[in-house]
Image (cartoon, coloured by chain):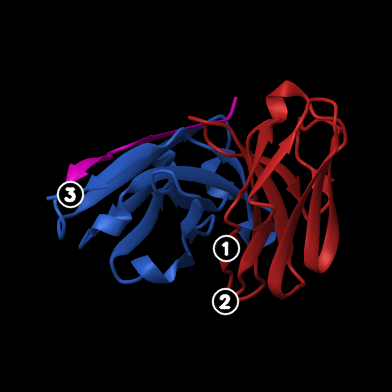
Chain colours: A red, B blue
Amino acid sequence: EIVLTQSPATLSLSPGERATLSCRASQSVTSYFAWYQQKPGQAPRLLIYDASNRATGIPARFSGSGSGTDFTLTISSLEPEDFAIYYCQLCSNWPPEYTFGQGTKLEIK
Amino acid sequence: QVQLVESGGGVVQPGRSLRLSCVTSGFTLSTNGMHWVRQAPGKGLEWVAVIWFDGSRQYFTDSVKGRFTISRDNSKNTLYLDMNSLRAEDTAMYYCGRGSGANHAYVDRWGQGTVVSVSS
């Protein structure tokens, strides 16, 4: 079973700053990797799939990168609505196993 | 537009059963794999189960294997999660979600969730 570890647990930044969130897999990932955003009281929303592709309607300030064991979500210039919890997720090839990281809380400084 | 609406949650005693439903609209259910994902109070997301677009395959997280069943009725645009032998640790918000990509790897649309509370 692949374990995803996100860092930091909490990230305190101000609007306009750049945010860099990390997700490390316990073994090399050769399959499907995504990032989600969840705001309080809301369902999660898919941001990034296949490690670097933005989902429909996601602003260009969100970008994903990485391969192997290390993946990054970057928000180039934080907007007030970006403060939320972010989860990484992977799906292994076969048999499919779906795993979420524990989340990074992005809070206003 | 795409909508997923869960129902069936509630308070149930340990060892009892519950059936969750997810009614979908705005897309063709029969062409999509579907997931259940849960979130315990104050905790992160935990994937629970997936069912292939045609119902031919189902996969579960280890903690619910043998207790939960996922099924679908494409003619009714509805996804189900049958939960048996419920435990306190099954207490959570349960979300249904539409799968996308190969192996239905991602959840690209989510419902608003239904709360399950297992307590004596």
Label number found at residue B68: none
For mark 2, what is the residue?
A1
Q: Is residue A106 above or below residue A23?
A: above
Q: Are marks 3 and 2 on the same chain?
A: no
Residue type (three-letter) at the residue carrying disc 1: Tyr
Residue B6 drawn in magenta: yes
Closest to the camera, between mark 1 and mark 3, is 3
Callout 1: residue from which chain?
Answer: A
- Chain letter of disc 2 in the image: A
Is residue A90 on the magenta stretch? no
Q: Nearer the viewer, residue A12 or A104?
A: A12
Q: Quadrant of the C terminus of chain A?
A: top right
The image shows residue A49 at horizontal and vertical percentages of 75, 50
**Mark 1 residue element:** strand
Instruction: Locate residue B95, reporting x and y percent.
Output: 45, 43
- Residue at mark 3: chain: B
> Which residue, given by chain and number where applicable, does mark 3 sit on?
B119
The local secondary structure at tag 3 comes to loop
Q: Amino acid at mark 2?
A: Glu
Q: Residue at x 47, y 67 (%)?
A: B59
How far apart are the alpha carbons under marks 1 and 3?
28 Å
Report the magenta residues as a range. B1-12
Asked if disc 2 and disc 1 are in contact, CB closer than 8 Å, the reply is: no
- Residue A98 is marked as 1
Return the x and y of residue B23 as percentages of the image width and height.
Answer: 41, 35
**Alpha carbons under labels 3 and 2: distance apart:** 30 Å
